[in-house]
Amino acid sequence: MRPGGKFNYKIEIAAENVMQFLNNQRFPEAFEISDRFLKRKPVHPVFVFSQSIKFLLDGNTSVFREIFDGVSRLKFVQHLDYYNFGVFFQTAGAFDLAAECFDFCLRLKPDFIEGWIQLGNSFQEIQETETALGAYLSGLAEDKDNFICNQLAAGCFKNLGHEDKALEHYRICYEKRPLDSNCRCDVAKCLIQLGRLEEAEYVVSNDLGKATNREKDLLVLSKIYKDRGDKDKALKLAAAAYEANSDNLHVLKVFGVLLADNAINNEAKGILKKAIIRDQEDAELLFNYAVACQQLNEFVEAEIYYNKAIAKKPGYHECYNNIGFVYEHLGESKKAIEYYRKALEFAPEKSEYHSNVLFTLLQTPGSDPVEHYNEARDWQRLHAATGDQRVKEYNFPKNKDTKLRIGYISGDFGDHVVSYYWLPIVKHHNREKFEIYLYSQIERKGNISETVTKEIKENCDQLAYVADLSDADLSQKIVDDGIHILIDLSGHTSGNRLKALSRKPASVQATYIGYPGTTGLDSIDYFITQAITVPLSDADLFSEKLVHLPGITSYNVRKGAENISTKPLPFQENGYVTFGSFNRSHKISKNCIETWARILERVPDSRLLVKRSGAEGDHFTEQMLASLKAVGVDRERLIFRERGDYLEYLEEINEVDIGLDTFPFNGATTSLDMLYMGRAFIALKGGRALQENIGASLLRYFGHEELISHDISEYINKAVGIAERLPHLDNVRLDLRKTYKEEIAGSGKRSCSALEQAYTIMWDRYCKGQQNEHIVIEG
């Protein structure tokens, strides 16, 4: 009954029907009832409100406002009337008007908790979080233990970055419902944000079997272990969540991502696909599915889903970056650069995207090395630390007789090719004169990596994993460690920490092994190489001063390779010539493919063995087959081998008579592996860029300049010519392995001695305050 009036059942039922029709957007029925009853009850708040909505829908806002404002002056208006009006406006998406209604509702009845809740919810919808929080706290002033108000207030505090305050309110909910998985997870997530992982783990693991939705608790536990770096345990917990409720959409999303993180990509793809069927609007889900496809080398599908994610979330820079990677892998370097630059447009602070541009330039046919130099200098201008961020002083005196502390920093320690170049050298460091500190960006897992890491640890004084450190914190750690000379082993490759190095955390800094080009950084003093690879005449392509070590490189094959012998060339047994390339597909340019097809055309019945990733029918395979078809070569003459075990790959080299090097980006490690297995190769000498001359440098060092060509026509003619005199190559097979063992695998001690001489000169110049100059260490 309305205060001061008589209850009229028909009128109140009619008013109730009007509100139901309005909420269901059945406006003609609502207006018909309100028009009819206004004649009998012209001051009933609901009927008057209905009339105002009629004008609002007609676009006559001034009349709407006049009638709507008049409702508050009606004699029998109640707080519940305004509450119901607010609910209507919420349903219609007019949250500012909803807030106005709930506010008036609370003027009429300040202790009406539901009014405070809905007032806060309306402000939340219009992104006024602080105002919403004020509403929820006002509700708590009336009832401090109200479950919903505490829950909503906690959410506001969390969104405002006040995790400690959020935790206070979530705890009240948790104490009321200790087995409610939502309450348990809310508390645990706050604790995780506050770095209190052990407390968080206790909350969601205590009475886990009795939790209302244990899959939610298991997902939070999974996150805790992921944050601790235990990916295996995180995956097991996510798998348990999936087992507990395989229909839970969030479980599908998290479990799928963790499967992909653990390289279980086929299963990850299947789980994420289930999630996509249920939710095609989640851009992050589409992105994660694309990543799983990419890791399976299903590049066409990966690109499709990256683009779907971009359609849902324009400016999704991670997608543009990954599409760039797809095109880079397919050998379409110009398109790759286009996408990397697009990613940079949306996220100009992402220096790694700019590094991707630089690395891809090295693989781009026709790219001028001066262009790479200028781009690297742009990287310095856009991403390097500013003057006030650079280290001003170091924690050691300038004493040329001090024991030098050398730091090596890389994302490639473990079972990665960089380690196989670096380890043969570092194991010979004079530990009486040099202390060795390592900074690892990635802790690589797996039996082989663990074996390599064990050897690495035996050859250093300290090893620190620094992926979680910010650039500023990493720089400070290097300063605190008192590193005299810091050596970067990554350049612009994945996992680099060039932004940290741009702060100049060590008094002398150099780059070595990991990247065949300049870093472009003012803070990197030296580029360590060999004269045969980068002559002083090419110094203008580097912002660093060159350091020439004697020889060519130091590299050793993996454990077990010593048991694999080099076998006679197979042409005599096969009755045909087998050419081979074991480089990754992104190095095999379109020019390469067309050139190799012409070689097969010229050498009757010859074969080409190529390593690849992905199933037949992918872009790379189709390109290869199309080039063969264009010159009339049967597809059966192309032999594909999937990438797999390293030792099996060495055995496969025995199936080849002569290698064909890639261009413009030459092979390096694969070429050395071929030489170890007694197989020579044809190389195309490029321009001045380092990566265009690796093959020619190796052949010159091994005494086989006759296999070096200077243009594509000569490359083809040399391949055809050598196919006619393979017995000669069979005679030098054992000499190639002998040279490899002595000059490459056996050069570690000599290279380390030369490197230490270079370090001593660098340090001496620093102590004397001299400018950096090129350094040449004689053999």
Image (tube, rainbow, N blue to C red):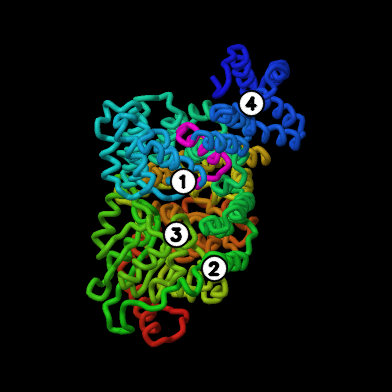
Looking at the image, residue 556 sits to the left or right of residue 78; the answer is left
In the image, residue 370 sits, relative to residue 201, either above or below, namely below
Residue that badge 1 annotates:
159
Residue 745 in the image: state x and y as whole percent.
Answer: 34, 61
Element assignment for label 1: helix
At 46% from the left edge and 84% from the top edge, which residue is drawn? 771
Stretch of the chain drawn in magenta: 110-130
Element assignment for label 3: loop
Looking at the image, residue 490 sits to the left or right of residue 576; the answer is left
Q: Nearer the viewer, mark 1 or mark 3?
A: 1
Marks 2/3: CA–CA distance:
14 Å
Circle 2: residue type: Gln
At 43% from the left edge and 72% from the top edge, which residue is drawn? 504
Q: Sort mark 2 into few (<14), some (14-19) or many (20+) by Cα contacts within 10 Å.
A: many
Residue 701 in the image: state x and y as whole percent.
Answer: 45, 66
As rendered, which of 231 and 185 lies closer to the eye?
Answer: 185
Q: Are dots 3 and 4 in contact, CB under 8 Å?
A: no
Asked if one can make out residue 636 in the rendered structure from this viewpoint, the answer is no
At 73% from the left edge and 27% from the top edge, which residue is drawn? 54
Q: Sort mark 1 into few (<14), some (14-19) or many (20+) by Cα contacts within 10 Å.
A: few
As rendered, which of 420 and 503 lies closer to the eye?
Answer: 503
Residue that badge 2 annotates:
380
Label whose residue precedes the other's in the sequence (3 or 4): 4
Q: Which mark is residue 496?
A: 3
Marks 2/4: CA–CA distance:
69 Å
Q: Quadrant of residue 30?
A: top right
Marks 1/4: CA–CA distance:
38 Å
Q: Residue furthest front?
A: 4
Circle 1: residue type: Asn
Marks 1/2: CA–CA distance:
36 Å
Q: Sort mark 4 into few (<14), some (14-19) or many (20+) by Cα contacts within 10 Å.
A: many
In what quadrant of the picture does the C terminus appear? Answer: bottom left
